[in-house]
Image (cartoon, grey):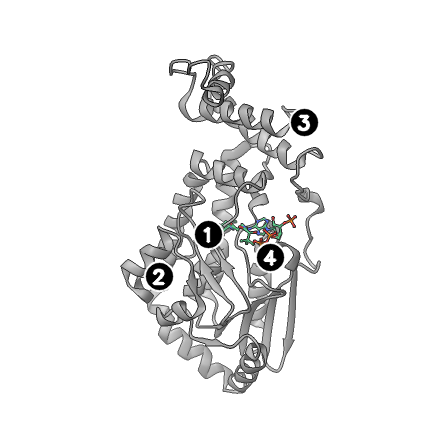
């Protein structure tokens, strides 16, 4: 690792310097006045890097962010990739009963944020569910959240190929992950047991039914995070709710209540939190007794005409995100979250 352990303030100034060098090249602006302490400190950090190439600065910037995550002196606790939950661990629980296969996100202490391993495990679970003898597949969460979206510490796990390689492999994983939802052959139901954020919201447009507790909210803060829509939401959301409502969500990050999401067509039905689990499971058990082949074929009739288009949109969104993940805006948002300075 390029950097040792720095105090929070030192790290912040140093980070700014590396970030400016990585995005704008060598310092090219006049030195701020002596009384402009903050900007002068940032300028000093940038100027100190001389003519260091942008690419080197970018690598070092990422190393600094990673070292911040790993530092025992910082307030950030990041589980090293090697220690993250492995396949077959309890971060994802899959059960099959009464003709229903249920995939449960099970990191309640982290609001069910999705680690890289969980994306892989969900794909495996969907693959298995598509072939098992269940009639319906359900995705839900354990605890007070449905899912807080992509685990932002995924960004700190930089491979030897550097940040570009990380962005490239992330885009491939994202595309594969979303493709599984596009192609899933059986009725797919989201049981949204609490707030939903980011990718856990966008992929709802690819589900067949979305049931939500009245405690749930739906939030896609992509601009705040320097990112852009995924999960085919750039197509499904305008189609479901109209372009202007979709823009409020996907561009301006408007958070919807469950009832608003239902009015706009993203959610099928909202239930009172006190009876949510009971009512939803009674309903699903009844549906699961319907002839499975008829349900599968009816889903195909409804969905298949759009599959090709959805795959193309998924590919395009994933490519755009690959670029976004390398942007200054995105790196800053991740650093802010990891430094505990920002929450949604
Ligand atoms: C293959 C790659 C595909 C990538 C696809 C891209 C997808 C885009 C997205 O999904 S964008 C959405 C990203 N998510 C966020 O930005 C959410 C960040 N989290 C928060 O803002 C808040 O945690 C909260 C509003 C969800 C909940 O706030 P609350 O105060 O109720 O709870 P805490 O903040 O104390 O959370 C408890 C612990 O959980 C950790 N955590 C929550 N969400 C995430 C997350 N997305 N990534 C990483 N960690 C998360 C949080 O840090 C707390 O941890 P701690 O107890 O160790 O402090």
Of the two numbered discs 2 and 1 on the same chain, state the one appearing first in sequence. Answer: 1
Instruction: Point out the frontmost of discs 1 and 4.
Output: 4
Q: Nearer the viewer, residue 302 or 21?
A: 21
Real-space Cα distance between discs 2 and 1? 18 Å
Q: Is residue 327 visible?
A: no
Looking at the picture, how far across and down is residue 48, in whole percent? 51, 14
Query: Residue 309 bears which disc, if any?
Result: none
**For the point 34% across and 65% down, which residue is it?**
306
Query: Residue 175 bears which disc, if any?
Result: 1
Of the two numbered discs 4 and 2 on the same chain, state the one appearing first in sequence. Answer: 4
Of the two numbered discs 1 and 4 on the same chain, state the one appearing first in sequence. Answer: 4
**For the point 55% across and 28% down, which residue is it?**
12
Q: Is mark 4 within 8 Å of ligand 1?
A: yes
Instruction: Point out the frontmost of discs 2 and 1.
Output: 2
Real-space Cα distance between discs 1 and 3? 36 Å
* Residue occupied by mark 4: 111
- At numbered mark 3, what does the secondary structure look like: helix, strand or loop? loop
* Residue occupied by mark 3: 5
* Residue occupied by mark 2: 237
């Amino acid at each position: 690792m390029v950097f040792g352990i720095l105090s929070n303030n030192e790290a912040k100034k140093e980070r700014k310097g590396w970030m400016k060098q990585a995005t704008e090249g060598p310092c090219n602006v006049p030195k701020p006045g002596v009384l402009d302490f903050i900007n002068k400190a940032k300028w000093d950090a940038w100027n100190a890097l001389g003519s260091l190439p942008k690419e080197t600065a970018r690598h070092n910037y990422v190393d600094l962010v990673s070292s911040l995550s790993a530092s025992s002196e910082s307030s950030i606790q990041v589980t090293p990739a090697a220690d993250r939950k492995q396949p077959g661990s309890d971060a994802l629980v899959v059960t099959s009963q009464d003709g229903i296969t249920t995939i449960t996100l099970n990191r309640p202490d982290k609001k069910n944020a999705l680690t890289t391993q969980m994306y892989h495990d969900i794909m495996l679970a969907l693959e298995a569910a598509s072939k098992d003898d269940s009639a319906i597949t359900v995705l839900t969460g354990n605890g007070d959240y449905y899912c807080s979206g992509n685990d932002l510490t995924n960004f700190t796990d930089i491979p030897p190929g550097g940040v570009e390689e990380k962005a490239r492999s992330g885009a491939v994983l994202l595309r594969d992950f979303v493709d599984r939802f596009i192609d899933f052959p059986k009725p797919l139901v989201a049981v949204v047991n609490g707030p939903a954020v980011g990718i856990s919201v966008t992929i709802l447009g690819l589900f067949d039914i979305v049931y939500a507790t009245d405690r749930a909210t739906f939030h896609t803060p992509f601009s705040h995070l320097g990112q852009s829509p995924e999960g085919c939401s750039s197509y499904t959301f305008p189609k479901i709710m109209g372009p202007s409502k979709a823009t409020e969500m996907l561009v301006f990050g408007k958070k919807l209540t469950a009832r608003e999401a239902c009015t706009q067509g993203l959610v099928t039905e909202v239930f009172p939190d006190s009876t949510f689990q009971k009512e939803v499971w009674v309903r699903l058990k009844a549906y699961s007794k319907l002839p499975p082949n008829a349900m599968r074929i009816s889903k195909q009739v409804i969905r298949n005409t759009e599959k090709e288009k959805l795959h193309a949109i998924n590919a395009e969104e994933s490519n755009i995100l690959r670029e976004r993940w390398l942007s200054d805006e995105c790196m800053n948002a991740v650093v802010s979250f990891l430094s505990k300075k920002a929450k949604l």
